[in-house]
Amino acid sequence: MEYVSTRNKDIRVRSGKAILDGQASGGGLYVPADLEAIKADWRGIIKLDFRGMAKAIWNIFFDDYGEEAIDRLVEASYKDKFSAQDITPLVKAGDAYVLELWHGPTSAFKDVALSALPNLMSAARGMNGFTDDIMILTATSGDTGSAAIQGFRDVPGTGIIVFYPHGGVSDTQRLQMVTPDSANVTACAIRGNFDDAQTGVKKLFREIPRPVEGVALSSANSINIGRLVPQIVYYFSAYAQLVKSGAITEGDKIDFVVPTGNFGDIMAGWYAFKMGLPVSRLVCASNKNDVLTEFLNTGHYDRKREFYKTTSPSMDILVSSNLERLLWYICGPEHTLSYMKQLEETGEYQITDDELFEMQKVFTGVFASDEDGAAAIKGVFESDGYLMDTHTSIAWACMEKYRSGDSPEGTVSFGTDAAATVVLSTASPYKFSAAVLEALGEELTGSDEENMKKVRGITGAEVPSGLAGIFAKPVIHKDVIDISAMKSYVIEKCTKQG
């Protein structure tokens, strides 16, 4: 399969090279050049187990690896790394279903893809005769950083630098990033928010793709197609589990409600839809940073707005990088390039009415407040005994608004013919125990460690093993820098690696 840059139609590569690059030169993102090439026998795929689905889907998107290599890479990525046998189990709550994506090493959905990316990247090095060391640069709003560190720690020929917003992640998320003591790992706080970190990382890819001799940059963010494709698998898995349980009949359409800030997770759902999976609506669930909600309802993207710190920090984003991929397919290369230039220069752009209409055929944008999310946590726990984290609860609240018609004024809905609704659950409630306890009306105990114990006492569920021991570990990574210092910081770290 051929991949093309969203900002330069002349940049065309195979998947291995796209994964090694992370981002195309000039700032573009790699996308499959021909959507017809991803059409699949979805009925056959849903009859497989999770690893079988991964092999089938990876063989479509990563066909230059070869089937034998794909089989080996999938097994290496998912064997004995997840606590759930189904990898991403589906749980019924009320009259909806929750797809639990957090049974991996760091208790977040990023584990599904970041257990795979290091293996895909290592294999791509050999396929492409790549001899440079690789430095992974990652901006994180909380979960990507820890999952990327766990995925890439101690991988030969690879280093990783994670930039996270100082004071902008939960204490548990921070400890997951600053306690690993592997020699090839660095976690650094920046004085700014996630958008500042992400913009800084993208700028470094353009300015210093090879910071020093013998070291090349790549990405573990969802701008890397090797991060995005593995996420497609769990959409098929959710559908398969619904069919197997008898909740739906094969061929029925379903709705997915996706809590998202960077548009990567829901973009994976769109690729699943384009592969043939019967999807009615993809509901884009945002928190108070509702730039995507406004865009999907008006066609106007405007990042020039107040940035809010919410109880769902992994969604506190105003520049949604993966939206560029959807723009390329819907609006075409020329308009996409123009819109991205406008965004960089003026902070906003407006797509045409026809382009917006095409998006709204499958996408719906809804937002919910912290208070809405807290009410969802309390309500679902009291009615069904199911406890959600603060990101899943935003999605649940958005689902309820969408279903009831109580969406924000101006929300566009084409209706749905879905036989079931699946809410994507992106993190364990233990990762955000303080906010979860507050939502339940419980008093906080002071520390995240004690709060986790209190949540366990309420639910009876075990604290995930990856979280249980982090509070006793020493802090290794203590750097806090200004955004302007990111370039020199990366060069220094790459010099030590090279």
Image: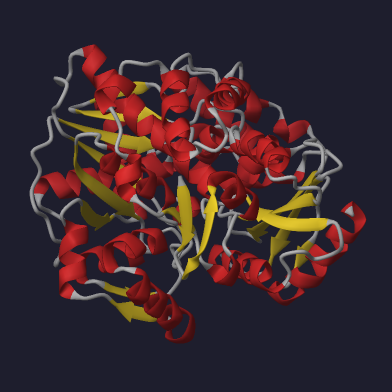
In terms of image quadrants, where is residue 352?
A: bottom left
Residue 308 occupies quadrant: bottom left
In this view, the residue farthest toward the bottom is 346
Residue 426 in sight in this render: no
Quadrant in the rendering for residue 294: bottom left
Left or right of residue 424: residue 114: right
- Residue drawn 21% across the image and 71% down it: 298
Q: Residue at x 85, y 58 (%)?
A: 493
Work out whether residue 247 or residue 27 is closer to the camera in this orientation and state it: 27
Q: Nearer the viewer, residue 39 or 301?
A: 39
Which residue: 38% across, 61% down?
323
Question: What's the colour scheme?
Answer: secondary structure
Establish if 268 lies above or below 278. below
Count the numbered circles shown.
Answer: 0
Task: Pick the residue in front: 195 or 72.
Answer: 72
> Residue 19's spot in the image, x, y percent?
59, 48
Image location (x, y in percent) of residue 357:
15, 64
Observer able to see residue 248:
yes
Question: On the rendered image, what quadrant is the N terminus found in?
Answer: top left
Image quarter hosting the C terminus? bottom right
Asked if 366 appears above or below 464 in the picture, the reply is below
Q: Position of residue 387 (x, y in %)?
A: 38, 29
In-front residue for pair 240/14: 14
| Position above or below: 348 against 414 | below
Image x and y of residue 26, in percent: 57, 72
